[in-house]
Image (cartoon, grey):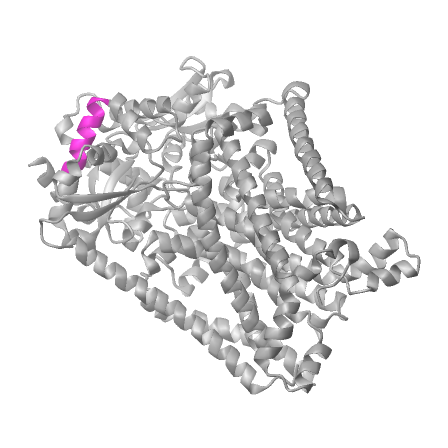
Amino acid sequence: MKQKVEKIEKLILPILFGVLLIFLWQAGFLHYIFKLKVYQLPLPTDIVDSLRMNFGKALYDCAITISGAIIGMAFGSFLGFAIAAIATFFPKWGYGGMVVVTALNAIPIVALSPIMNCWFSSGMAQKIGVVTVVCMAAMALNAYSGLNKLKPFSIDLMYTAAADKWTIFTKLRLPNCLPHIFTACKINVASSIIAAIISEYFASSTAGLGFGIKDNLRKAEMSTGWSYIVVASLAGVVLYSIIVIVERNAIKWHASQR
Amino acid sequence: MRKKSKGLKRLSIILALAMTASLFAGCSSGTSSTGSASAGSTTASGSPQKVTLQLKWLPQSQFMGYYIAEEKGYYKDEGIDINILPGGSDIIPEQQVSNGVADIGVTWTSSLMKYQEKGWDLKEVAQVFQKSAMLLVSKKSSNINSVADFKGKNIGSWFGGNEYELYALLGKYNLNKDKDIKLVQQDFTMNQLESGKVDVAQAMTYNEYGLLLEAGYTDATLNKIDVNDEGVAMLEDCLFSNSDWLSKNPDLMAKFLKASIKGWQDACADPEAAGKIVYEKNKSVSLAHQTYMAKEVAKLVVPSGFDKTQIGYMDPAAIKQTADLGLKYGLLTKAADTANTIDDSYWKKAVGK
Amino acid sequence: MEITKKDRRIVTAVWVTGFFVLWELLAFLIQFVMRVPMANTKIPYFHTVVGTIAQNWQSLLKDSAITFSRAAIGFALGAAVGIILSIIMSLSKMVEKIAFPYLIISQMIPILGLAPILFNIVRDMDTARTIIAAYITFFPVSVNMLSGLKSVEQEKKDLLYSIATNKFNIYYKLMIPASLPYLFTGLKITAPMAVTASILVDMLGSSSGIGVELLYSLYSSSTDVFWAAVTASAILGIFSYYVIVFIEKLSLPYKKNMPQKGADSQ
C-alpha cells in the first residue's frame, strides 16, 4: 500500500509542477517577469489550438523524427559500446578509438548534417547518420568507465579462479557496466531527439519535427512552431520514462535503484 | 531512504530556491542594464548616438551599402555610432528588432508582412531592393525550359518564408504544389542541384547563381526563370524598426537612412570597390564572389532607369503585388494593412522630399 | 602489460597515420573506383584539407582560440550548473522527481526557439551566448554526476551516519569523492560538446570563430575551407578531452593504473 502511494506521488508531483507552470504561463506571469509579448512566446491555449488543428501532420512528423532518433540512437549506442569494448580488450591499441569518438563529438550537427546530406540521398538516412555520430560518444565513454572501474580485487579474484578474458568480460565487466549504459542512454535520449530535429533543418525533405519547427518559427507561426516543440518534449519524456522503467527492472541490485 | 532528515530536505529546497532567485536576479539585472542602454541612445545630440543594425544574413555584399557607409564615416557624420550585427542560421531579424537587441533590421518585405499580420509591432521604413533576386535554376541537360516543364520534377526550396514566389509561379501555370511536383528542402549549398537530387533549385542572382558560375556552369549550360519576368516577384531586402523605437527616435531613423542611402549610392556606383571593402570585413568568402555579388546587388538597388537619389523608395505597386501574392498563396491570411505597417516619413526626410 | 610512454607514442603515431591513409584511400575509392559524382564534396582528399589548414592556419588558429575560450566559459558554467543540480536532486528525491522530466524537456527546445526568448530576457548577445553554451552542456554532467551520487551504497552512508557525521561531511567525504569518476566521465562527454555549443553560438551573429568559418564556407561552397573547419573543430574536441583527462589525473591520483589493475575508485 505504502509503495503504491509512493508511486502515485512520483507521478503526481511532476505533473502538479507542470500544471502550475502552465497556469503561470497562461495567466501571463511568465510574460510579465520576462517582459515577453504574447506574439513572441505564445500562450499554452494557442499552442494547444494549433496542435489540435494540425494534429495529424504533427503526429506524422513526430513519428518520422522519433523513429530516426531511435534508430540512430540504437546504432550510435551500439557502435559506442563496441568501441568501448574494443578499448577494454586491447587497452594498448584500442584506446585510440575512444579519442576518435571524442573528436567526432566535437563536430557540430550543423556541419554533420550537410556532410550526411552529401552521403545519403534520403532524409531519413541523413537523420540516422547524424544521430548515430552524436550518440556514440556518451555511450563509448560511459561504457568504457563501466567496463574498467571494477570493485577492488574483483578482477584478481577472477584471475585466481583462472577465468579467461571473455569470462571476465561477461561475468564481471558487463554487469558492472550496466548502470553506466543506462546513464548513457538517458543522455542519448535527449541528444538523439534534438540531433534529429536539428538535422532536419537541413535535410532534403519537408517532413519531421525539425522542419516544422524551423519553417514555422521563421514564418512567425509561433504557436505552430511551439506546438512542434511540445510534441518533441513529450516524446522525449516518454522515451526517457521507458529507459528508466527498463533500468529499474534490469539493475535492481544496484545502489542507485534502492 | 526514509531516514533522510528534515534538515536535508530543507537544505535542498533552500538551494533550489537560491538558484531560481539568482536566475531571476540575473534576468532583472539584464533588463535594467538595457534600460540604461536605450536611455543612452536618446541623449541630446552632440555625443554620437548608438544604433544597432541587424542583418538578415552573414556579412556579404548583399549588405554593402551599410558597410560602405560605416567605412566612409557617413554614419559618424550623422552623429551615429553604428553597430552592424551579422545574421546567422538561428537569427531572425524581426525577432531581434522586436526584442530590442537591434534597433533596425534588414529582412524580406514578404516575411515582414507576415510578422506584422501576426501582431508584431514593426514598421517598414525603406525598400532597399527594388526587384526580386529570385531565380529558379535548372541544368540545361534536364530540359526544363518553362514552368510548365516543372511537372513531375523535384523542385528545391529553402522554405521558412522563401517559398511563396515559387508557389505563385506554380499557381500562375496551374500546377498544384502538392500533387504535380515534389518539393524538396534545399540546404545552404547548391550541391543538390549539381548532383541531380533536385531538378530545379531556388537561387539568388547575387549569390547561389554566382556559386554555380564559379563551379564551372555557364549561362549556356543553365536554364533560369526570373520571377520578375514572370510577374510573380515579391519584394525582398527592406529596412524596418519597431514602432516604439521609431516614436522615440524619429530623427535618428531619418539620419540613419540618409547615411545608408549615401553608402548605397557609393556602393552601386562602384560595386567592384564595394565588394573589396566587404571582403576586408570578412575574408571567409572569396573576393571574386564578393565583387560578383556587389555587381548583382547593385542591379537590384538601382535597376536601370531608377533614380539613384531615390534609393529606398517604397513603390506602392510593388508592395501591393507582394501583399496580394502573399494573400493568394497562403503567406498571409488577410489583406496587408499597408497604411499602418509602412511609414515613409523617415525616408522622405532622408532624401529631402 | 604496463603501457609505457614510448609505447603510447608509437600507438598514437600508428593511429594518426592509419587515419590519414584510410581517409586518403576512401577519398580515392569514391573518386576513381566508385566514380561517385561530386566526390570532393562527399569527402575531399585529406592532404588537400591539410593544405587548406596550412594555408589558412593563422585565421583558423585565431578562430579556434576564440571558439575554444568561449567553449571553456560555457563549459565551466554548464558543468557548475550540472553539478549543483545533481547535488540538489540527490539531496531530495522529491526535487529529482519533479525536476528531471523538465530537464529532459529543456533539452528538447531548439536554440532557434529558445534564442529569441533568451535575447528578450537578457538583451545582450554575449551574455545570451554564454547562457546558451552552458544550457547545451549542463545536461550530461548532471546525469552522470547524479548517477555517481546515487551509486554510493547505503551501507557506507549508514556507516557515516552511525558515527554521527553530518550531511555536509557525508557529501564532502563520501558522496562527492565516490561520484567523481562518474563526474569525470560526464565531463569528458561534455568537453567536446562545449566546443560544439560554442560553434553553434558563433553562428548566432558572431563575427569570428570556427562556427562563422563553417557557416560561411558552407554557404559559399568552399568545400576545402569547410572541411578544414570541421577538422579544426575535431582537433579542438580532442584537445578539450585531454584537458579533462589531465585534470582527472591530477585530482584522482590513486587510480592511475586503473585500466590494467581494475583498482577501484572507492
Q: Is residue C178 left or right of residue A207?
A: right
Q: In the rendering, at what x and y percent does residue A213 appear? A: 46, 50
Q: Provide the major secondary structure of the magenta segment.
A: helix
Q: In the rendering, at what x and y percent does residue B218 appear? A: 42, 15
Instruction: Please give the range of residues in magenta.
Output: B258-270
Task: Examine the rendering and report whether any part of residue B119 can be seen.
Answer: no
Q: Residue furthest left?
A: B353
Indicate whether residue C218 is drawn in magenta.
no
Q: In the rendering, at what x and y percent does residue B212 appear? A: 44, 22
Q: Residue furthest right?
A: A162
Residue B125 quadrant: top left
Q: Quadrant of the C terminus of chain C?
A: bottom right
Number of numbered discs present? 0
Front position in the image: C235 or B213: C235
Residue B205 quadrant: top left
Q: Is residue B116 above or below residue A151?
A: above
Front position in the image: C121 or A107: A107
Q: Is residue C188 left or right of residue B237?
A: right
Q: In the rendering, at what x and y percent does residue A15 appear? A: 53, 73
Q: Is residue C67 above or below residue B143?
A: below
Q: Is residue B71 above or below residue C68?
A: above
Task: Examine the rendering and report whether any part of residue A145 can be seen.
Answer: yes
Residue pictured at 59% horizontal, 46% vertical = A105
